[in-house]
Image (cartoon, rainbow, N blue to C red):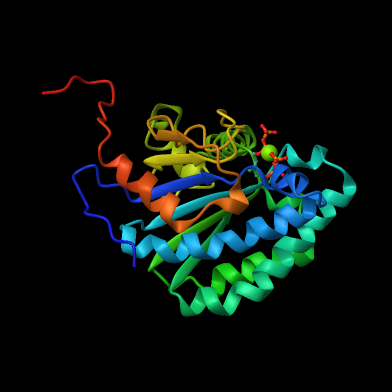
Amino acid sequence: MLVRNIKPNGLEHVAIIMDGNGRWAQNKGRPRLFGHQAGARRVKEIVESCPGLGIKYLTIFAFSTENWKRTQIEVSGLMKLFKRYIDKETQPLIDAGVRVRFIGDRLRLEPSLVNLMDRLEELTEKNSAVNLTIAINYGARDEVTRAVKRMAKDVLNGDLSVENINEETLPKYLDTHVLPDPGLVIRTSGEARISNFLLWQSAYAEYEFIDTLWPDFTKEIFADLVNQFDNRERRFGGILR
Ligand code: IPE
Ligand code: IPE
Ligand code: MG
């Protein structure tokens, strides 16, 4: 098992932008969906390595609100892959003590997929070894917009006063309201951008942009990045003493 010496930086939540599936497949002369299938298979090993590394929360970006712009073949292939993945992994995830949550707007997803997502959340709700959050049809701007709408309704209903809107109350309306902020955000595939992921939550996260394409990402690479985090100097706007 990969073990980490837990130091004061206290990393407990890692978020990953799993990018590069398409290029990985194209490099092999295969269709993009072949890369997505390979990418989905990588998730298990990373989730399983979390307890040994002291990571209680893992959040992974699977499909963004912008990914609907892709071809119909790719989008429907991805939706099918999510359904198959949830169906196949439900029992192993229960057995491994993983609690699964989904973030993102479910309204645009097929009801058959949403049913599987709801069921997996329910079946794993008593687990606590690792909290795995999967972002599907997630976009941070969309999330904040939906949060602001709900806040406005609460203000109109008299359940929230304008004076009480602050940096503690606003995140309670985000999809991630039960999660701590990520300490580390990893993006694979060499792109150094956020692509609308966890904008509020990652305001003070450390970022690691690595060249590895997601289907080549391993638990050893993950452990290295987690261990490097412990050597980072986090200041949060203050000064070192
Ligand atoms: C990430 O891989 C997975 C999704 C966005 C669904 P990509 O499909 O973006 O792969 P590249 O970036 O085209 O290589
Ligand atoms: C971000 O990757 C979304 C996911 C990994 C699900 P994209 O491949 O969609 O991001 P861009 O288009 O390169 O910014
Ligand atoms: Mg990409």
Give the x, y percent position of residue 232: 28, 33
Relative side of 192 to 56, left or right: right
Q: Is residue 197 above or below residue 120?
A: above
Give the x, y percent position of residue 62: 64, 50
Please give the name of the residue rendered at 67% of the width and 48% of the height, measured from the top-left corner.
105
Give the x, y percent position of residue 103: 58, 51
Quick check: can you spot residue 231? Answer: yes
Looking at this view, name the residue that lies furthest to the front: 28
Looking at this view, name the residue that lies furthest to the left: 241
Q: Quadrant of residue 92?
A: bottom right
Q: Nearer the viewer, residue 94 or 110?
A: 94
Q: Quadrant of residue 149?
A: top right
Q: The C terminus appears in which quarter of the rendering? A: top left
Q: Ligand 2 is found in which quarter of the picture? A: top right
Quick check: can you spot residue 178? Answer: no
Please give the name of the residue rendered at 77% of the width and 58% of the height, measured from the top-left corner.
79
